[in-house]
Image: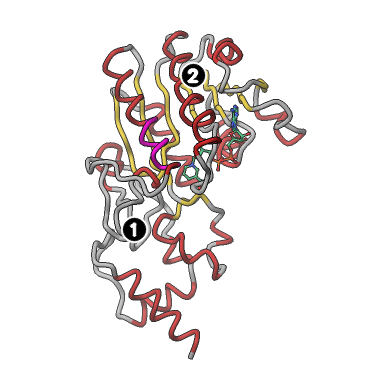
Amino acid sequence: MRKLLITGGAGAIGSGYAEWARDRYQVTLLDLPGQFDDRHAHLGRLVEADLRQLDEIREAFDGVDTVLHLGGERHPWATWSSLLPANIVGTYNVIAAAVAAACRRVVYASSVHAVSGYPPGSGVTEDDPVHPGDLYGVTKAFGEALGSFVASTEQLSFVALRIGAFQDPRVIDAPETGWMLQDYTAPTDLYRLIDTVIDAEPLRFEIYNAVSGNTFTRLPMNKAREDFGYVPDYDSFQLSTPFREAIRAVGGVADRAMESGMREEIESSTRRKEIA
Ligand SMILES: NC(=O)c1ccc[n+]([C@@H]2O[C@H](COP(=O)([O-])OP(=O)(O)OC[C@H]3O[C@@H](n4cnc5c(N)ncnc54)[C@H](O)[C@@H]3O)[C@@H](O)[C@H]2O)c1
């Protein structure tokens, strides 16, 4: 069994993935003091430490095969004062500790925000230059760049996943979730992709879009499909009743991952219908 260290292990993705993967890997969860409670006790070994302090976290990396780095500031509207310590210093410390402990791989929670400066529906591939839409996205691009650097200078493999809007499929039909449909990421779609990139060989440095198979999308999932045969189960536009009806009304869609701006068109026609 691989030893897996999950930073930000008390958070939404960390604790959800630990529940999913705890029979598959030997899991350690690391988070800030006071973040763990009874819900986490059965998930694995729990370590309270602050990613901003390299000396505090180093011991947790001993004997670890793969680090799933999720810990940090996750709000796109966050300001530099919280982003610098949590996402820049914290990510540097995680990668430095992984190098020092000779870990095999870091799987990094990057974000659609690393490329959210591109227009909606523009179908951004993993080869396009980063184009963050906010400072949070800039910090995610920093993590990807640092990963690229260590993967070419150290014996550490690094895989960045550009995660979209991580939400339970049951909430996707709520009207206020319309904005996130093109970036929607169903939990089990993400968890299956994490399993895949933890175990895949050989990988040195890679970036993967990590969303569901949404009919209209900013992040087409072609690369994961080509490299691993990975196919997401969910499509936000199928889950969402208003959008499903709108797609039916325009006669269906021939293809996935459109670059046409049709999403906006459908969105506004749905809104017009709702108003009428
Ligand atoms: N949730 C999403 O939709 C989404 C989308 C794209 C990327 N991501 C990224 O995925 C990761 C996990 O997201 P999430 O939704 O689970 O977030 P979350 O806020 O639920 O979890 C993040 C965890 O990191 C911990 N943390 C923060 N600063 C820390 C520090 N200095 N030391 C140790 N732990 C610290 C927090 O206590 C928290 O438990 C984040 O890096 C986020 O940027 C999330």
Q: Indicate left or right for 152 with 163 as reference.
A: left
**CB of residue at label 1: within 8 Å of ligand 1?**
no
Q: Which residue is mark 2?
A: 93
Residue 74 percent coordinates (x, y) = 53, 41
Of the residues shown, which amino acid type is indicated by label 2? Asn
Q: Closer to the camera, 8 or 65? A: 8
Quarter of the image holding residue 130? top left
Residue 21 percent coordinates (x, y) = 55, 32
Q: Which residue is mark 1?
A: 217
- Report crowding for label 1: few under 14, some 14 to 19, many 20 or more residues within 10 A (C-alpha): many
Name, please, the residue furthest toward the front. 81
Q: Closer to the camera, 269 or 202? A: 269
Q: Closer to the camera, 133 or 6? A: 133
Secondary-structure class at tag 2: helix
Residue 35 marker: none
Write the start and end of the magenta stretch as one range. 136-143
- Report crowding for label 2: few under 14, some 14 to 19, many 20 or more residues within 10 A (C-alpha): many
Residue 213 percent coordinates (x, y) = 37, 55
Q: Residue at left 54%, top 35%?
A: 81
Q: Is 50 rendered above or below residue 124? A: above
Residue 219 percent coordinates (x, y) = 32, 51
Of tags 2 and 1, the one toward the viewer is 2
Q: Indicate left or right for 235 with 166 as reference.
A: left
Say if mark 2 contacts mark 1, CB within 8 Å: no
Secondary-structure class at tag 1: loop
Pointer 2 or 1: first along the chain: 2
Q: Is 37 rendered above or below residue 257? A: above
Q: Residue at left 54%, top 9%?
A: 62
Q: Residue at left 52%, top 42%?
A: 79
Q: Quadrant of ligand 1?
A: top right
Name, please, the residue furthest toward the right. 38
Q: CA distance from mark 2 to mark 1?
A: 33 Å
